[in-house]
Image: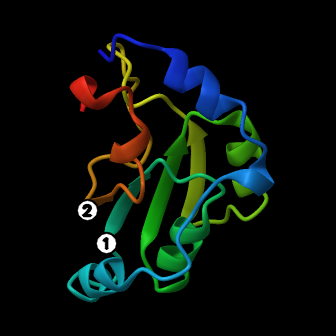
Amino acid sequence: MVKSLDHVKNWQGFTAESIPTKSSTPALDTFIQQLESGSRVLDCGCGCGAISRQMASLGFSVVGIDINPNAIQHAQAFAHERLCFSLTNIASDDLPAIGGAPFDAVVCQLLISIVGGITDR
């Protein structure tokens, strides 16, 4: 478990509109091309779900998780049969079972850089 929870409080305080995301994801695009159609993908640290939505539009079944309730609430407006979102802290010692598991792939866009401090990563 990550010792410092300040990062959790900080991240949970972001409004949905202020959550950072990348507009250009060439490495992710290359990765996605290697997945079989219909693959089940977990998007850890999904924020407002931009990458999750992109993957679902390509035919993947996607579960997006994030610790920010504002982001998840925003993302859930886009949920559909192949796209769902869950308020989940992946750094928790008691990580709940994530619906949709097992997954064929996991995406962590920008997540590692914000989990805990440098010694926690």
Reading the image, the residue beneath label 2 is 105
Q: Residue at x 62, y 27 (%)?
A: 10
Q: Identify the coloring.
A: rainbow
Q: Residues within 10 Å of mark 1 (few under 14, many from 20)?
A: some
What is the three-letter code of the residue carrying label 1?
Answer: Ser
Q: Position of residue 98 (x, y in %)?
A: 41, 37
Give 29 or 42, whichever is nearer the viewer. 29
What is the three-letter code of the residue carrying label 2?
Answer: Ala
Whether residue 82 is visible here, answered yes or no, is: no
Q: Does residue 100 lie above or below 40 as drawn? A: above
Reading the image, the residue beneath label 1 is 39
| Mark linked to residue 55 | none
Would residue 62 be found to the left or right of residue 94 on screen? Answer: right
Whether residue 117 is visible here, answered yes or no, is: yes
Give 49 or 8, whichever is nearer the viewer. 8
Q: Do the CB atoms of the residues marked 2 and 1 lie less than 8 Å apart?
A: yes
Q: Position of residue 48 (x, y in %)?
A: 66, 56
Q: CA distance from mark 2 to mark 1?
A: 8 Å
Q: Position of residue 105 (x, y in %)?
A: 25, 62
Q: Secondary structure at mark 2?
A: strand
Assign the C terminus to one quadrant of the image: top left
Would residue 69 be found to the left or right of residue 17 on screen? Answer: left
Q: Secondary structure at mark 1?
A: loop
Assign the N terminus to one quadrant of the image: top left
Q: Does residue 7 lie above or below 5 as drawn? A: below
Q: Residue at x 38, y 55 (%)?
A: 42
Q: Residue at x 64, y 36 (%)?
A: 68
Please identify, in this view, whether the residue under mark 2 or under mark 1 is nearer the observer: 2
